Image: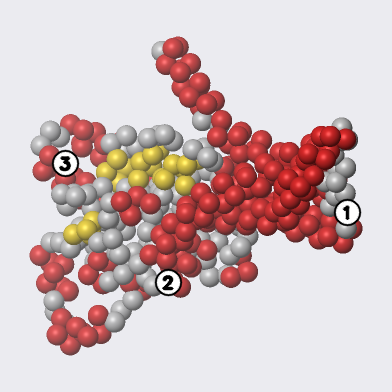
């Protein structure tokens, strides 16, 4: 037992290494850009002030969004989705799978769950002992069920889900702009260094004179400028693909897990089951207040337990499949057929406040 606890502690400590690496790179980039480029290399005072102002705005936004991505804890399903002790005991004592499925269906009857397992059963987590809400998944690293789980990111040592997906997207966006800005402003001095170095390298070796090349007077500054450009370009390229992929996911209202495995509804798998259109998909993540879209402040719609669906047929609760329910629905089927097809899924939401 002591050995197992020791291994778990070591694993938790090693999990922070990627975060530590990014923090060290961020500190070095701050020193290299502010001290070595702006204070030592750039001689024009107007250019120096402009560089520093824009850099610090992007730096603050980068650090703020990264901090929120790392330290915003993922949200677990509410108590309504957890099994009571009596239900848990009844479920565990039952050995017949079909009866277990009936028990789960009975427990989930009053819950807003519309997605199912591949074989049509209720999505249930044996480890957390709860009915999984739509888009909720169990994270083996965090050892918990996470609402609208997207993926577990080692670079933030956190599970990306409903509570911090907006922060993660903003972190990618601002880190992309941060790298692009550094590369664009450093490139000018990088070109000057290589041009002057190539043309008069032999002359300075023959005269045994140290570098005194106007703006680039310090060999240490040239080293930082060189690596600032290379590191900024390298991270910009990798972040560009990652950010582009998540922008595509947001436009389709999918998570990374749903992109690989489509959610299953009453009528079967549907990768576009939660796709409400581009604008509404954006509002799902960023909220309706546009002034908060670019700030790492929680503004996502809902509480993570229920999400509007694309069509009425997918919004119908698959658990309410008894004969009585279908007869009640079919009373006014003909006169209301057209009207029902126009009802927005948003209007059929369960009262979340009761959860």
Residue 167 in view, yes or no:
no
Q: Cα distance, mark 3 to mark 1?
A: 75 Å
Query: Quadrant of residue 22 in the image?
Result: top right
- Element assignment for label 3: helix
Q: First in sequence: mark 3 or mark 1?
A: 1
Q: Residue at x 87, y 32 (%)?
A: 208
Within-10-Å neighbours for mark 2: few <14, some 14–19, many 20+: few
**Residue 87 image offset from top left, x and y in percent:** 25, 40
Query: Quadrant of residue 184 in the image?
Result: bottom right
Q: Which residue is mark 3?
A: 100
| Marks 3 and 2 close (CB-CB < 8 Å) | no
Quadrant of the snapshot with the C terminus: bottom left
- Element assignment for label 2: helix
Whether residue 6 is situated above or below residue 214 in the rendered picture: above
Q: Which residue is mark 1?
A: 43
- Drawn side of residue 32 relative to residue 103, left or right: right
Query: Quadrant of residue 331 in the image?
Result: bottom left
């Amino acid at each position: 037992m002591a050995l197992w606890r020791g291994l778990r502690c070591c694993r938790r400590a090693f999990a922070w290494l990627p975060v530590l690496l990014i923090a060290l790179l961020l500190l070095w980039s701050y020193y290299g850009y502010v001290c070595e480029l702006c204070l030592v290399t750039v001689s024009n005072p107007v250019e120096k002030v402009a560089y520093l102002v824009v850099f610090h705005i992007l730096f603050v936004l980068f650090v703020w969004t990264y901090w929120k991505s790392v330290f915003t804890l993922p949200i677990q399903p509410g108590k309504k989705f957890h099994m009571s002790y009596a239900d848990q005991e009844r479920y565990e004592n039952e050995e017949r799978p079909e009866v277990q499925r009936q028990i789960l269906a009975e427990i989930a009857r009053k819950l807003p769950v519309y997605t199912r397992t591949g074989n049509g059963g209720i999505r249930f987590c044996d480890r957390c002992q709860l009915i999984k809400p739509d888009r909720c998944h169990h994270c083996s690293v965090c050892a918990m069920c996470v609402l609208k789980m997207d993926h577990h990111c080692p670079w933030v040592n956190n599970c990306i889900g409903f509570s911090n997906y907006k922060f993660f997207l903003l972190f990618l966006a601002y880190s992309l702009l941060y790298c692009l800005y550094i590369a664009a402003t450093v490139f000018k001095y990088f070109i000057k260094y290589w041009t002057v170095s190539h043309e008069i390298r032999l002359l300075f070796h023959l005269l045994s004179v140290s570098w005194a090349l106007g703006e680039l007077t310090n060999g240490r500054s040239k080293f930082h400028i060189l690596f600032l450009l290379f590191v900024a370009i390298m991270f910009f390229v990798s972040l560009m693909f990652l950010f582009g992929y998540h922008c595509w996911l947001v436009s389709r209202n999918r998570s990374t897990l749903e992109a690989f495995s489509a959610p299953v509804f009453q009528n079967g798998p549907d990768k576009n089951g939660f796709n409400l259109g581009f604008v509404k998909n954006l509002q799902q993540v960023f909220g309706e207040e546009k002034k908060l879209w670019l700030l790492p402040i929680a503004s996502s719609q809902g509480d993570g337990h229920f999400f509007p669906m694309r069509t009425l047929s997918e919004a119908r609760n698959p658990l309410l499949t008894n004969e009585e329910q279908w007869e009640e629905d079919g009373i006014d089927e003909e006169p209301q057929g057209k009207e029902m097809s126009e009802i927005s899924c948003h209007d059929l939401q369960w009262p979340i406040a009761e959860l």
